[in-house]
Structure formats: C-alpha cells, structure tokens
Image (tube, helix red, strand yellow):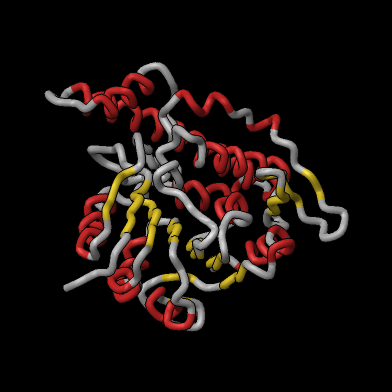
Amino acid sequence: MNMSFIKVVLKKSIPSSWKSTLIARIEKQKNTVFLKQLQSNIIKYYDAKQVISVDEREVIEYLKKNAITVFPYDFQEKYDKESIPVFLDSINKLRYVMHDNKKLYFKRSYSENKIKSLYHGLLLDQDKQSPHLYLTERFALDAKDVIADIGAAEGNFSLANVEKVKKIYLFECDDEWIEALEATFNPWKDKVEICNKFVSNTDSVNCITLDNFTKTHPDISFLKVDIEGEEGNFLEGSQSFLHSKSPLKIAICTYHKEEDEEVFTAILKENHFEVETSTGFMIFIHDTKIKAPFLRRGLLRAQKKTASYD
C-alpha cells in the first residue's frame, strides 16, 4: 500500500494524537514483510548456485535457522542490549556509556533506549568476529599514528584508540554529534581535533576534500572511513594524498553499495596499496533495493608501506 495515500487518509480521518503511532506501526509491518522476503530470496539464490564458498554457506545456514540481521553470525548472541548501563552526566546533562573504561557521550536528543540500541550495534560492529572490524593483530595502530576518523559519529573507534596514538582528527558533519564528541574527548583535547565538515570530493563551507585538508595536515597515517555510502566521493577527493603518502593505512567500508568492494579495491591497488577484505559478510538490510548477490564484505583494509611511483 502506498504510504503517501495512507498518510492522506490518516490526516483526514484520524486524531493527530494517534497518527504517528499508526504510521510507525504500518512502517514496522512493511519492514517485517520486506525482511522476510529478503531472507527467502537470499536462501533461494544461494541454494540454486552450483558453487558456493565456505563463507557463503555459513551465512545461508545461519539464515535457515535465525531471523535475518546485518550480522548473520552467532557472535551477536554474546551481547544483551537491555543489560547495557546508560548514565546521565550531572554537569552537562548528556547521557553516556562506559566504553573501554572511558565515557562515550551521545546526542542530547537520544533516549536511554535509543542509546542502548545504538551502543549494542557498536559492540557488534567491533567484535573480533565481526565483518565490520577495523583493526586486527596484523592491521594495527601504534604510538606514531595520526588518525583521520572520517564519519566519526559518536567516536567509539577513536575513543577506543585515543591513548594508543599520537593525534586524532575527528570529521563529523552532523552538528548534534559535535556537542557529544566535545564531551567525550575533553580529557584528550590536546591531541584530538574535531572538524565539523563532511569529507567528500568538493571543497565548500560544509565540505572538504582530504587532498585539501592534508595540505596543512600531512601527518595523517591512518584513515578510518564510514560515511553512509559516500566513500566513493571521499576517494575521488583524496587521490593526490593516496598516491603520494607513505606509509599509510586505510580501513574503508564497502557494505553500503554492491559495487564498492570491487571499485575501491581497484582504486587502492592503482595507488600501490596491499588490499584485503574483512572476514565474513554483512547483509545491508537498510538498502531497500538490495539485490543478488546480497552478501557484501564489511570493509577493506589497505596498507602502503613504501612510496608510490608512476
């Protein structure tokens, strides 16, 4: 049923106090139907394949026994959303959780339940078995590293590593996150710089390219990039830096779009990076147009140890 039509009917015939609740229920029902159909389509697609990898088979066996989820693996059972403690700072009145024994603050508008849901997702993201895991034993940070956290959001990745590295630049374009980031990183404000910019392929009031930023900040040695499907534009605006900078490591998300893994791998290899994918697959259930082959690698880890030559 068309949602625009439903909203018109509700506007004319339903008391305003009921409208948002009814629309939310309709949207939830639509999403449930979509997810069930998606799960069925994925299983049928891979069951029909003549050749299927061990990694793919693991996901399909999971889906035959469990509801579909972004991370189709048993490791998520280790985490209980309801057991996450959320605290209220008596001074700034922002809510926070304890992340690696440090305070991780959230948007002022976020309820306790929303914070629990979000932080639960963050724990899944960086589980040692997660397809979205940024760092590994072989792909790690050290005391000389300078991080550019591009798409910082609440800043959990940088907070986990703030005491290990030399400096961090946090890039976040959502104004409401800035207040939370300032609170989180106040104890390390001498080594953390918050940049209220979107890193893309253009330079403007609200946007900046990495090529432009690194003209005055050439010390960056590690890039963590998760910007909701705009990673391709980020790479386009970073070509000079990627080509010339060494050593350099990049962890860049590839799950937002089907073609990103292949396209980004080619770009990085052209710039003399060694590239590997994260382990396992994600199912990006928020992509309502998702199609076969459905399963996507969470991110690429790329490393360049020596200078680039044409």
Please give the name of the residue rendered at 30% of the width and 76% of the height, measured from the top-left corner. Answer: 240
Residue that appears at 40% across and 76% down = 209
Q: Position of residue 237 (x, y in %)?
A: 34, 73
Q: How many marks?
A: 0
Residue 288 visible in the picture: yes
If the image is split into quadrants, where does the N terminus sit? top left
In percent of the image, x 69 and y 40: which residue is there? 113
Question: In the image, is residue 231 above or below residue 277?
Answer: below
Q: In this orientation, does residue 154 appear? A: no
- Residue 27: x %, y % from top left: 50, 41
Q: Is residue 199 found left or right of 50 in the rendered image?
A: right
Q: Residue furthest top?
A: 65
Q: Is residue 241 above or below residue 12?
A: below
Q: Between residues 284 and 89, which one lies in front from this camera angle?
A: 89
For residue 305, above or below residue 125: below
Q: In the rendered view, does 130 fall on the left or right side of 241? A: right
Relative depth, front residue between 219 and 193: 219
Residue 168 location in percent, x, y?
56, 65
Question: Residue drawn at (36%, 61%), measured in percent from left and top?
Answer: 231
In front of the other: 64 or 14: 64
Q: Residue furthest right?
A: 90
Quadrant of res 294: top left
Q: Position of residue 153 (x, y in %)?
A: 57, 58
